Image: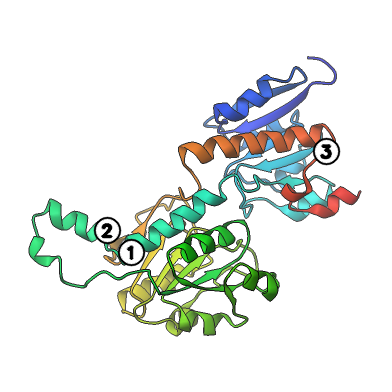
């Protein structure tokens, strides 16, 4: 191998659109791991200059053996399985895929809102079971002129807002890190008190990162503040909504229904108790994954690694920007 050859470690592989970027370079090679053990991952990390991550954890144990590593890149935008401070201590950037799947997640959030509001699964079962007589029980509702609370106004939250405004909804935004002027400029209303926003909302959608501040952000108290006719959707990360509290709220009629793409533990070791409830629609963490977004995320992820190799990382895609000053 040439002395200047850089190696990208790819646990669980990479979409062909990303691999094409590697193939176009004669100074970069990819090493793909499938069905690997932790020990095998650690061994491969020893010779890796970059690593692309799905949900594979990366922390101190991994970084201690990754002496050649120059960066880590998430195939997506969430990074709760990555020890960011550990990377920062070593001066290594954590790259995310920018806006590659933002539109996709925003669409899925709207899809879940519509699915629960329009009782999509219920009506599908009624037709297949020839229960047409039940169709007028528990009528569906419109999104038109309803109030939506968006929690988190970043890449995905802003795009969800555009789609909700296009459906003539009123949009509230709770995000203590975004200036009120920016929220108003987007045609939305900022709310500084989460419970007050929840009390006004007909629909709630979660688009904030998972961290120490947002774990159990929505618990029993917050759910109790919502309307009994309200719907809540989470396409961000499991654990932001407390699942025990959500189960009790759905079962007890505290809120109307929910749509979840994420769980606190994925995949669960057994069928989750939320699955037993009739007023919830669930998906297996696929909100950001489509034919198109898979290609976009792969290209963005590999390009992020190549940019680090070339000494020109895009600051917009760096989570721990302080490492760029070193």
Instruction: Look at mark 3 in the image and give the residue it sits on.
Output: 312
Seen in the picture, residue 193 relative to 271 is either above or below; the reply is below
In the depicted structure, whether residue 155 falls above or below residue 306: below
Cβ atoms at labels 2 and 3 below 8 Å apart: no
Q: Residue furthest top?
A: 1
- Nearer-N-terminus badge (3/1): 1
Foreground residue among 67 and 282: 282
Q: Which label sits on residue 116?
A: 1
What is the spatial separation of the Cα atoms under label 1 and label 2, in whole angstroms? 7 Å
Tag 3 secondary structure: loop
Q: Is residue 31 left or right of residue 1?
A: left
Taking the image as shown, residue 255 lies to the left or right of residue 106, namely left
| Residue 78 spot, x, y in % from top left | 61, 52
Q: How is the image coloured?
A: rainbow
Q: Is residue 154 above or below residue 302?
A: below
* Residue 44: % across, % down: 68, 29
Residue 295: where, in percent of width, then height? 55, 34
Kindly identify the residue that appears in the image at 86 percent across and 48 percent down: 324
The answer to whether mark 1 and mark 2 are in CB contact below 8 A is yes
The answer, for residue 74, to whether it is visible in the render is: yes
Q: Secondary structure at mark 1?
A: helix
Residues at discs 3 and 1 in contact (Cβ within 8 Å): no
Instruction: Identify the residue shown where x is 70% and y is 52%.
Output: 83
Q: Which residue is mark 2?
A: 120
Q: CA distance from mark 3 to mark 1?
A: 44 Å
Tell me the element at label 2.
helix
- Residue at position x 65%, y 69% in the image: 185
Looking at the image, is 90 positioned above or below residue 133?
above
């Amino acid at each position: 191998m040439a002395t200047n050859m850089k190696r990208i470690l790819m646990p669980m592989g990479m979409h062909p659109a990303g691999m094409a970027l590697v193939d176009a370079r004669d100074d970069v090679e990819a090493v793909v791991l499938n069905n690997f053990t932790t020990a095998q991952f650690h061994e491969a990390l020893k010779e890796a200059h970059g690593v692309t991550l799905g949900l594979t954890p990366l922390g101190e144990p991994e970084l201690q053996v990754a002496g050649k590593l120059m960066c880590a890149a998430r195939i997506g935008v969430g990074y709760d399985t990555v020890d960011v401070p550990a990377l920062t201590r070593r001066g290594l950037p954590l790259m995310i895929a920018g806006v590659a799947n933002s539109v996709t997640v925003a669409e899925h959030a709207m899809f879940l809102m519509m699915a629960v509001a329009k009782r999509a699964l219920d009506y599908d079962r009624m037709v297949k079971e020839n229960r047409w007589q039940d169709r007028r029980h528990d009528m569906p509702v419109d999104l038109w002129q309803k109030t939506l609370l968006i929690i988190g106004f970043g890449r995905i939250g802003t795009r969800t807002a555009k789609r909700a405004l296009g459906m003539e909804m009123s949009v509230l935004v709770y995000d203590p890190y975004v200036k009120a002027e920016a929220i108003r400029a987007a045609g939305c209303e900022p709310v500084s008190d989460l419970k007050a926003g929840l009390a006004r909302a007909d629909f709630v959608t979660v688009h904030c990162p998972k961290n120490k501040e947002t774990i159990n952000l929505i618990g029993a108290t917050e759910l109790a503040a919502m309307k009994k006719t309200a719907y809540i959707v989470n396409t961000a990360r499991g654990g932001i909504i407390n699942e025990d509290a959500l189960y009790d709220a759905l079962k007890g009629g505290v809120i109307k229904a929910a749509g979840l793409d994420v769980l606190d533990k994925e995949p669960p070791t057994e069928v989750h108790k939320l699955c037993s409830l009739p007023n919830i629609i669930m998906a297996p963490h696929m909100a950001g994954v489509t034919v198109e977004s898979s290609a976009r995320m792969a290209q963005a992820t590999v390009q992020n690694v190549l940019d680090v190799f070339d000494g020109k990382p895009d600051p917009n895609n760096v989570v721990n920007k302080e490492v760029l000053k070193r």
